[in-house]
Image (tube, rainbow, N blue to C red):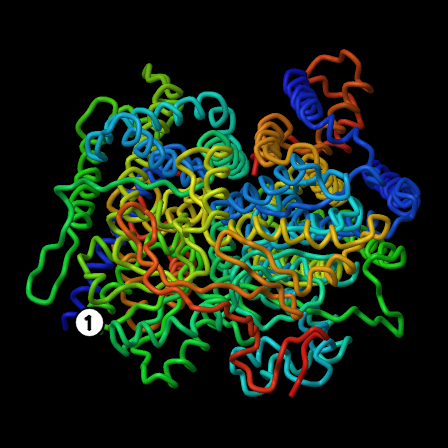
């Protein structure tokens, strides 16, 4: 037999073992922290396709935890962040969330950008009665008693946006989104609003997630000449779409893209020139003028680099940690459980970078929707600011269903 | 009883003891830890399914994840119907589907679900196999066609949001009720259910490998034309093993849905399918037990590495894979076989013809690497 | 009518992008039978190289192209020498090894540069559109079409008109006899792999103004590139070009009739059927492989 090959094999196994030895030799179950610190889980992808956004959420949440610890922690105890990387894969999300909630005994877990990952985590969260803090805008239609929803639901993003858009640009909407539940739900809600305010849908289409070549879509847009392009494409698709729109020399003054998902992160990749003139609807923009935001942006930039941006999901990731802290402070230090935290969090107000936010009894958040127009410097100029905080109605599009403090209620 | 079968049976017994007694004892019979390990066991079944077709017959099925996904969706559909209690599943309402699609109706019954989870993948596998092997497609092209099929299948599943839940998959599933026993996925009982399935699958795999059927498959792997000249209908044999492999993958998928409590189109992604190939390669594609162990080891390693290196675990895994492929192409099974040789032959020179165990426990060297 | 013409142009543009990405893969596969699943990551490396040169040295994409070619080619050369060379007699193992290499490259880029999407500016002189009646053609896409054809011609010239090309063709036909004639097959293979990688790098640099530059951009591209190579036929440049044109136009037309997702499914189904009936592709070369 071939000795050299065999030795090579042994060498490879040796190297592999050396690389993985520390991991394999660690004990199978970690001791949970009793008494001295409070374990919290951070479940944001650092690798894979959604890492582009989720790593910023990780950064913002971690920064909040560090700030809280530096100010003395909660009840004199430090927060211990346990970081997992679910690699943009729902099955890995499910696995790591179990680790955090069951083995590591976290009293809360902050995580997820996509709804798919949140739904993968939901079974174990509800079974173990843990608390999942979800900072991202989503399609609504969920009413879990174990999830704190920090992002906007369709009614918060669209109720003021659609009439304003019809008034300022016209009634003909071209809907382009990625092919999954979020764009479809947003479009469903949009259609109900359009019907109410006299708009019409010129075309509705969906492209696969990650799809990059929009020549066909641009051709159709050119042919149809809508007044508004209602965009729910996300991530790489949004970047590609915006750049190709610009390359096609279409005019955002006449036919703007109004996006629910485009944030400072995408705009940075699109480039100021191509992004300028288009609009986004969100509760927060990096240029928001509040003292809390100035502090937030300054700390973020000094911690992570002057060229970094904050956006409406990382802002939510940040303020959710503070909401968690505020809820903890209301509790008896000897009795910290996820459900107690949840009950303490209901009705909590907090000065977030976007303004003062309130946690509803249905565990969603009252927010301040805004419409921003992107400038060539990568920042958004707010063109419409809602006068009052908008309540979250996750089942707004569905007659006869409401999300309340007792869960989903029919009728 | 050949020497090889004897060694395989010993390995099976040892493996069974470790899985049934050793691991639970090591984890203190803790439901959560066992649930994590149960996931590895379920993945072991799909890895051994690939070993049957790849190591056993030389057919690299890069689309194994598609059949895996079919099984997992079958189980998920049944559990979703159970959770919806007679009304339309929630995601269908949101997609404006007026009534339960015909394809969902049979899944109310557990019996149909179990059969479908095995037979539908087998049937689809059979279709693809007939399509390929009647035309004597072999080698690299099998890999490519199966890969193209996988990509197309995943796209179809994602596209048909009203039927399959689209990108989000099927979530919000009820727990399984098996003959009156409500299966709690964090219980020791569930772990033994999965372990039992794995043992059964391995036994089936061993039976196939050591039967005449397995022998003919190996002959086909070495030289399909020569086997044809002997009068064997090569395409039929390839189709049958492809179907069996697909059925096993479907079985694995059903268990996986039970472990994770949801089904997602990511189970049918190219990365996942290649991950299955990697587990099989690391363990050793020539042996079903080794392939299962490979899956368990790699996933265990991944879990541990990501614990310790939150940032760099992916990179380390990539490096390890490359090293394994380069230096231990026959996987750990091959390495152990070589080790056995070194120990038993001592310093015998290469090419010495006499050793009997040489002939029986190592695969014949004349064949072209596939 | 306008819509159809615009769609035809869109298809041509898609085809040119497919061609320039798949060309490197076709050469590597045609010459050495290596299934290089890291090809997408070579494209990604080219994109990041272009970004790095633009950000740190202020080069526009066009100026950066030769540097990108050399840089990614060098990476390819190293990978070939260290890893791929040992796997020539194990074609299916190259799938796994190159997949692993792809993961490693992706993670290295992510760890060093970060996961965020990078902005690369397109060349000024190529911005804008040319309009002929109702037909709108993006200037940059016209440039891409022309460039991909130029690269195709250059590769053809390299293979048929240079001494290196002759050596490569000899080695493809019969490695042992070529070595008897004094051709260093190993050397030829290394350079070929490097050339294929360099082409992928150029492709990456060229597509950055249109698409998003992230570490994961390669994974989606490699399957498509692969299918183009298989459909076109082994070792055939014309085949690769024809397959790119076919697949690009088919995707565009299907997406006109249905939607993009169904279009892609239809194209994949078509490819499966095609490989079944013509497994050696549209234009198989006659060298005995």
Q: Position of residue A280 (x, y in %)?
A: 37, 60
Q: Nearer the viewer, residue B243 or C15?
A: C15
Q: Position of residue C83 (x, y in %)?
A: 50, 25
Check the image and report above or below for B260 versus B22: below
Residue found farthest to the left = C133
- In the picture, residue B238 is in which quadrant? bottom right
Q: Position of residue C204 (x, y in %)?
A: 32, 39
Image quarter of the N terminus of chain C = bottom left
- For the point 51% across and 51% down, the residue is A315
- In the picture, residue C44 is in which quadrant? top left
Q: Which of A18 and A94 is in front in this view?
A: A94
User: Neighbour class for label 1 at 10 Å: few (<14), some, many (≥20)?
Assistant: few
- For the point 62% across and 64% down, the residue is A359
Residue found farthest to the front = A291
Horizontal side of residue C14 vs A264, given as left or right = left
Q: In this rendering, does residue C228 appear at all?
A: yes
Horizontal side of residue C181 vs A346, given as left or right = left
Q: Which of A7 and A346 is in front in this view?
A: A346
Name the residue that disc number 1 marks.
A223
Q: Position of residue B84 (x, y in %)?
A: 70, 79
- In the picture, residue C288 is in which quadrant? top left
């Amino acid at each position: 037999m071939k000795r050299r090959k065999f030795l090579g094999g042994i060498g490879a196994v040796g190297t592999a073992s050396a690389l993985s030895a520390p991991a394999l030799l660690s004990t199978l179950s970690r001791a949970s922290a009793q008494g001295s610190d409070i374990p919290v889980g951070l479940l944001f992808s650092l690798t894979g396709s959604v890492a582009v956004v989720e790593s910023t959420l990780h950064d913002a949440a971690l920064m909040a935890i560090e700030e809280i610890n530096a100010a003395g922690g909660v009840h004199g105890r430090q927060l211990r962040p346990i970081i997992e990387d679910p690699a943009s894969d729902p099955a890995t999300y499910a696995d790591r969330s179990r680790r955090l909630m069951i083995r590591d005994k976290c009293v809360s877990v902050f995580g997820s950008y996509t709804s798919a990952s949140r739904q993968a985590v939901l079974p174990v969260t509800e079974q173990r009665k843990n608390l999942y803090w979800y900072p991202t805008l989503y399609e609504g239609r969920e009413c879990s008693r174990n999830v704190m929803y920090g992002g906007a639901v369709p009614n918060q993003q669209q109720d003021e946006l659609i009439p304003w858009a019809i008034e300022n640009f016209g009634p003909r909407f071209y809907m382009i989104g990625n092919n999954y539940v979020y764009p479809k739900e947003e479009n469903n809600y949009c259609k109900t609003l359009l019907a109410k305010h006299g708009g019409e849908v010129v075309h509705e289409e969906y492209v696969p997630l990650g799809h990059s070549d929009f020549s066909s879509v641009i051709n159709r847009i050119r042919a149809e000449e809508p007044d508004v392009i209602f965009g729910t494409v996300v991530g790489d698709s949004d970047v590609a779409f915006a750049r190709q729109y610009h390359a096609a020399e279409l005019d955002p003054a006449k036919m703007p893209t109004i996006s629910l998902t485009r944030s400072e992160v995408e705009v940075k990749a699109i480039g100021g020139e191509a992004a300028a003139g288009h609009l986004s609807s969100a509760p927060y923009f990096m240029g928001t003028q509040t003292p809390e935001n100035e502090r937030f942006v300054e700390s973020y930039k000094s911690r992570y680099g002057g060229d970094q941006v904050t956006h409406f999901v990382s802002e939510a990731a940040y303020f959710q940690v503070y909401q968690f802290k505020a809820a903890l402070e209301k509790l008896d230090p000897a009795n910290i459980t996820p459900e107690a935290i949840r009950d303490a969090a209901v009705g909590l107000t907090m000065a977030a970078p976007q303004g003062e936010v309130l946690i509803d009894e249905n565990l969603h958040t009252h927010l301040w929707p805004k419409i921003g127009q992107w400038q060539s410097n990568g920042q958004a100029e707010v063109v419409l600011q809602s006068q009052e905080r908008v309540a979250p109605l996750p089942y707004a599009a569905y007659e006869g269903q409401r999300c309340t403090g007792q869960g989903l209620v029919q009728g | 009883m050949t020497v090889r079968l004897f060694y395989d049976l010993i390995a099976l017994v040892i493996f069974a003891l470790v899985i049934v007694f050793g691991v639970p004892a090591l984890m203190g019979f803790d439901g959560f830890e066992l649930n994590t390990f149960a996931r590895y066991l379920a993945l072991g079944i799909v890895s051994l399914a690939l070993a049957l077709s790849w190591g056993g017959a030389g057919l690299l099925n890069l689309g194994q994840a598609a059949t895996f996904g079919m099984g997992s969706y079958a189980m998920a559909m049944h559990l979703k119907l159970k959770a919806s209690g007679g009304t339309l599943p929630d995601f269908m309402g949101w997609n404006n589907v007026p009534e339960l699609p015909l394809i969902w109706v049979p899944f109310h019954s557990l019996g149909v679900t179990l059969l479908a989870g095995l037979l539908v993948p087998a049937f689809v596998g059979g279709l693809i196999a007939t399509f390929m092997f009647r035309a004597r497609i072999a080698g690299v092209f099998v890999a490519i066609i199966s890969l193209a099929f996988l990509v197309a299948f995943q796209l179809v599943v994602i596209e048909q949001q009203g039927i399959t839940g689209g990108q989000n998959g099927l979530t919000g599933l009820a727990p399984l009720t098996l003959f009156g026993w409500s299966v709690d996925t964090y219980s020791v009982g569930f772990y033994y259910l999965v372990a039992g399935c794995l043992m059964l699958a391995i036994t089936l795999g061993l039976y196939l490998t050591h039967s005449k059927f397995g022998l003919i498959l190996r002959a086909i792997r070495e030289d399909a034309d020569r086997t044809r000249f002997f009068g064997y209908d090569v395409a039929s044999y390839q189709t049958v093993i492809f179907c069996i492999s697909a059925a096993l993958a479907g079985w694995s998928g059903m268990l996986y849905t039970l472990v994770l409590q949801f089904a997602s189109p990511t189970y049918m992604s190219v990365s996942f399918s290649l991950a299955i190939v990697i587990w099989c390669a690391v363990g050793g594609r020539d042996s079903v037990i080794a392939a299962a162990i490979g899956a368990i080891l790699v996933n265990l390693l991944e879990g541990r590495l990501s614990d310790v290196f939150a940032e760099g675990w992916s990179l380390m895994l990539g490096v390890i894979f490359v090293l394994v492929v380069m230096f231990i192409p026959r996987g750990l099974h091959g390495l152990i076989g070589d080790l056995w040789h070194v120990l038993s032959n001592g310093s015998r020179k290469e090419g010495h013809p006499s050793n009997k165990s040489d002939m029986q426990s190592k695969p014949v060297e004349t064949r072209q690497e596939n | 009518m306008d819509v159809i013409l615009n769609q035809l142009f869109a298809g041509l543009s898609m085809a040119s992008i497919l061609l320039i990405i798949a060309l490197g893969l076709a050469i590597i596969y045609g010459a050495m039978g290596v299934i290089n699943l890291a090809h997408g990551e070579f494209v990604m490396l080219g994109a990041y190289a272009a970004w790095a040169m633009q950000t740190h040295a202020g080069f526009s994409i066009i100026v950066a192209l030769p540097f990108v070619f050399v840089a990614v080619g060098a990476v390819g050369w190293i990978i070939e020498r260290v890893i791929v060379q040992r796997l020539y007699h194990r074609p299916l193992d190259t799938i796994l090894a190159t997949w692993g290499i792809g993961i490693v490259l992706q993670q290295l880029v992510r760890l060093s540069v970060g996961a965020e999407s990078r902005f690369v500016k397109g060349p000024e002189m190529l911005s804008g559109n040319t309009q002929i009646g109702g037909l709108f053609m993006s200037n940059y896409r016209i440039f891409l079409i022309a460039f991909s054809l130029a690269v195709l011609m250059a590769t053809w010239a390299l293979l048929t008109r240079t001494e290196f090309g002759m050596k490569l063709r000899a080695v493809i036909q019969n490695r042992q006899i070529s070595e008897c004639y004094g051709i260093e097959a190993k050397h030829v293979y290394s350079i070929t792999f490097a050339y294929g990688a360099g082409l992928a790098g150029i492709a990456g640099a060229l597509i950055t103004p249109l698409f998003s530059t992230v570490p994961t951009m390669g994974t989606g591209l490699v399957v498509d590139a692969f299918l183009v190579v298989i459909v076109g036929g082994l070792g055939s440049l014309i085949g690769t070009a024809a397959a790119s044109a076919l697949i690009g136009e088919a995707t565009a037309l299907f997406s006109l009739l249905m939607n993009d997702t169904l279009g892609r499914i239809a194209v994949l189904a078509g490819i499966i059927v095609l490989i079944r009936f013509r497994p050696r592709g549209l234009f198989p070369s006659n060298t005995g492989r």
